[in-house]
Amino acid sequence: MDRIFGLVAEARALNSKIFSLPRLLILISLENLGPDGASYRELKAGLKMGDGLLFTNLRALKEMGYIKESSIKLEEKEMASFSITNEGKEALSLAKEWLIKWLKVKDGELG
Amino acid sequence: MENWGEKMNRLGKVIACFKEVGFKPNVDSFQDKLVMQKAVCLMELLGFDTGYGFSLYVRGPYSPNFTSDLYENKESVRELRTTERLTSEEKELISKIHEISNHFNPTMLEIMATYAFLVKKLNRDYKSALIDLKTLKSYYSEADIAVGVSRMKQLFPPSEKEIQEMKKEFQAWEKASDEDFKY
């Protein structure tokens, strides 16, 4: 039982708004691309998300300060690119650590 | 933990390659970084040991270590500053990539490197690699994909195993054709 209290206590440090599949996928994909980030079209194709879903979640992450948008030029075309911020890396790392702790709990220990 | 000298050596070789084909990259340009990533990935896949490991990301094959070296040495890259020398084989290799990719055309390099990575590194067969390529690079036209795939095949001659598989595949057709000629 003390395990669940531990998980609940640690969950308070997390931002629950990133616990959605599209948001986690966006942050995970941008994590290893560092300052380079990825263009909107690369995220859309690579994550197989429609415009509505991708746009809404990119906007939410941007408002939280977890990603930043820049304008890039590729073969004479102007397009948007997104990269993860230090705050985004930190929030993702906290979420990852919390999930690992939860996964390490054996069945029945949370009862 | 790598030291500065080791990092500079591997980046120096890459800079020497760009110098060889007259490509002066700007590390602050998204397009130039894309070109560098994909060209170096193709070099690796063709057997040139650059020391950079590539993995598949949403952007296709990409090396975070290479990016970090580029950011740490922006000026050396911009000015093509290096003491490294290329062997004649290495010069030939980079010139071939440069020529076949239409002088480092970003679209061509992206398609060629992604397709080559799926086939050569991830061992996908040509057919399933093409399906994955079309998903990952769905923003390119069918025509661009077709040209890029054909260029990649020009760059990587078929292995002995692939030749044998092709022979096996064509055997049935040849047999049928021989049968036709009998009548």
Image (cartoon, rainbow, N blue to C red):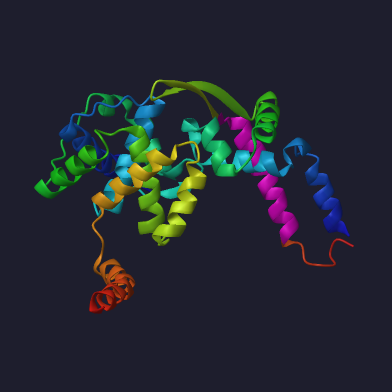
Where residue B37 appears, as percent x and y from the top left, is: 36, 39
Quadrant in the rendering for residue B100: top left
> Which SS does the magenta portion mostly show?
helix
- State whether residue A65 is above or below residue B148: above
Q: Residue at x 24, y 69 (%)?
A: B160
Q: Write the start and end of the magenta stretch as one range.
A: A83-103
Where residue B166 appears, as percent x and y from the top left, is: 30, 68
Where residue A107 appears, as percent x and y from the top left, is: 81, 67
Q: Is residue B139 magenta?
A: no
Is A21 in front, or is B12?
A21
Quadrant in the rendering for residue A65: top right
Is A3 in front, or is A91?
A91
- Left or right relative to A14: residue A37: left
- Can see residue B51? no
Q: Residue at x 82, y 51 (%)?
A: A6
Q: Residue at x 38, y 28 (%)?
A: B31
- Can see residue B171? yes
Q: Is residue A84 magenta?
A: yes
Is A88 in front, or is A53?
A53
- State whether residue B66 is above or below residue A80: below
